[in-house]
Image: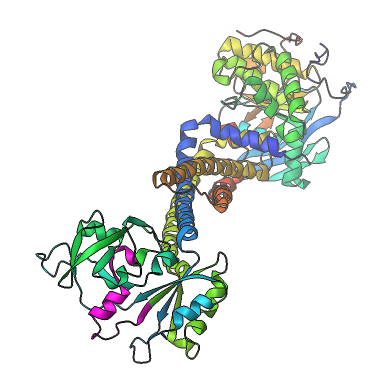
Amino acid sequence: MPSLTPLDLLRTAGTGLTGRPLRTALSALGVALGIASLVALTGVSASNQAQLLAELDALGADLAIVWPGSGHDQQPLVLPKAAPEMIARQDGVLRVGVFETPPQGLGVFRTDLMPITQTGGITVSVARPDVLAAVDAQVASGRWFDEATRGLPVTVLGATAAQRLGVERAGDRVFIGGQWYGVLGILADSGLAGGIIETSAILGDRWVRERFAVEDGIGDIAEVFVRAEPGRIAEVTELLASTANPGAPHQVSVTRLADLSAAREAADDALTTLGLALGGIALLVGGVGITNTMVVTVMERRGEIGLRRALGARPGQIATQFTAEAIALSALGGLAGLALGATAAAGFAIAANQPIVIPTMALLIGPLLSIVVGALAGLQPATRAARVSPTVALRSV
Amino acid sequence: MKTPTSSTPFSPHSTARTTSPSPAPVLEVRGVTKTYPGPPSLTVLQATDLTIASGDQVAVVGPSGSGKSTLLSILGTLDNPSTGEVLVDGRPVAELSERKRSALRSQRIGFVFQQFHLLPTHTAVENVATGLLYSGVRHTLRRRRAAEALEAVGLSHRLTHRPTELSGGEQQRVAIARALVRNPGILIADEPTGALDTATGAAIVELLSGIAALGTAVVVVTHDEEVASHFARRIRIRDGVVTEPAAQAIRPNKPLRQGASCLA
């Protein structure tokens, strides 16, 4: 029993599409937009994540932070004084930097004339000299604390803090907690790992311990930044709690910086989900558009269907022809959408100065999805076409 | 390209047909009726018997609404009779599955329609090649045989023209070539001159009756007595009743020439 070769089928299906180019283009547009939004949004999201991972690798991938945990009464516990030294001796740990608990209620101002409510969101941190290396921050202007300056009324400003205060270089002075401080240095934009100190005015630990000795918690450890040897952060993190407080490891919180960024990744996932939903809706609408076109096509081409039946086409071959047309229509849209979406994603990545990433999955699933949509959309019209009686060829005018 | 011999312009690839004095019937109709269920039910074709042999030239003549198209659909296996049976090459069509019936059409029956039914996006040679699409013939061979069939109907100079670039007579010739390209045992033409002017129509009639001389049975349905007068057998149909007068005068037919260019 003769049946059409795939090539014959393609030729026959192509005839229907090339015969009415405008209609073909418009019907394919819906699917094209659907696939384009799918590819573009997954591409943008993937570029975002790639950027994030690159940042993490550059700045914070090997970084973990040890905090004092909270007790059963939600009061912060205290890390043992020896914790930093013990952590520094742990296998796989490269550097350790210690922040101490800052004095409470200190406002940071450009001058003594500023109203105390305008803090500008700048906080006060207290750092030991080892913090700079542990965080891997750079000094843009001036110097970092040393053995002499850690005991003096001077401050090192984070990049954002300096910008908000309007301090452009070291040597200036700012008004902190009712007292003038010299600006010892200004940090460079220190990226993700430096997020905590970006908006801080950092004071020397020895100065704070002497000046604010009467206050609660002064001299206690607030955070220990731990930089692991490359690739060993996972094993280091696992043991940090026990190392910091061997007697009560459950009283220690340990956070990897990579974990902090998981929240941002989750936000990106939400964006992707939204994109997928939008793309899915567009695809659905595109599919309905194709069904609509095919229904009209079948009605218009009853004469041709009758002719083909008279020429010996079986009902199944007629159904296959129209299904193939619907699939070809949809696949055409899918390919156009792929190109459009990839271009959009690449354009976005270039504009945002991010690496261009188009997930392979999107490249594969896009066309595949359009074929499925086409097959589903063509099903009903094709079945109708197969039911057209061959005698219409004799009657239709 | 192989040029067909002048004796068998339409069948360069088929075995020669037997031309015995009493050729076997290609198509037989026994007690066929067609009734459309009502209410009220409508009988459009009364009990009809008909035998068509190879090389027969048959004109079915009747006014519109007489049941011509119904008879034609049944003869062409496009429609089922309500009662009675249709035999093609001695085999009852009713016993065939839809699949086998389609295959039978693709191999044994050629159709020519009043409205030509050419595909507007296809060239002449592609349109004719469509006649072989469902017969399991390879693409290249389809095109070669299509070109030969077009040559036989006198259109070798119009191979790559699209229907809109052809005159009505030329379009009908393309349609005839499409029907003939697969060497059908029977060619069924439904008002083939209905959409053509008189002179062009006459040329088409001449072409069709010439085809019968080559062994293919030709059945032409028409309301036009003038057209019918060119065919040896004239069957009349009126209100669903088919009659065949015994003796008939035949207008002489010129034999079909190869590459006949009798277009107006």
Q: Position of residue A345 (x, y in %)?
A: 45, 46
Q: Is residue A206 magenta?
A: yes
Question: What colour scheme was applied to this rendering of the protein?
Answer: rainbow
Q: Identify the residue shown where x is 75% and y is 39%.
A: B103
Q: Position of residue B172 (x, y in %)?
A: 62, 19
Magenta stretch, residue numbers: A197-222
How many tags in the picture?
0
Please indicate whether residue A375 sits to the left or right of residue A36 in the image: right
Q: Identify the residue shown where x is 71% and y is 34%.
A: B75
**A202 and A261: which one is in front?**
A202
Q: Position of residue A86 (x, y in %)?
A: 49, 81
Q: Identify the residue shown where x is 9% and y is 64%.
A: A113
**Any part of residue B230 in sight:** no
**Any part of residue B173 in sight:** yes
The correct choice, above or below, for A370 with respect to A231 in the image is: above
The correct choice, above or below, for B235 with respect to A373 in the image is: above
The correct choice, above or below, for B69 with respect to A342 in the image is: above
Q: Position of residue A102 (x, y in %)?
A: 28, 77
Please indicate whether residue A49 sits to the left or right of residue B4 in the image: left
- Identify the image quadrant of residue A11: top right
Q: Is residue A50 magenta?
A: no
The quarter of the picture where the N terminus of chain A appears is top right
**B251 and A116: which one is in front?**
A116
**B213 and B143: which one is in front?**
B143
- Identify the image quadrant of residue B16: top right
Please indicate whether residue B213 sits to the left or right of residue A322 in the image: right
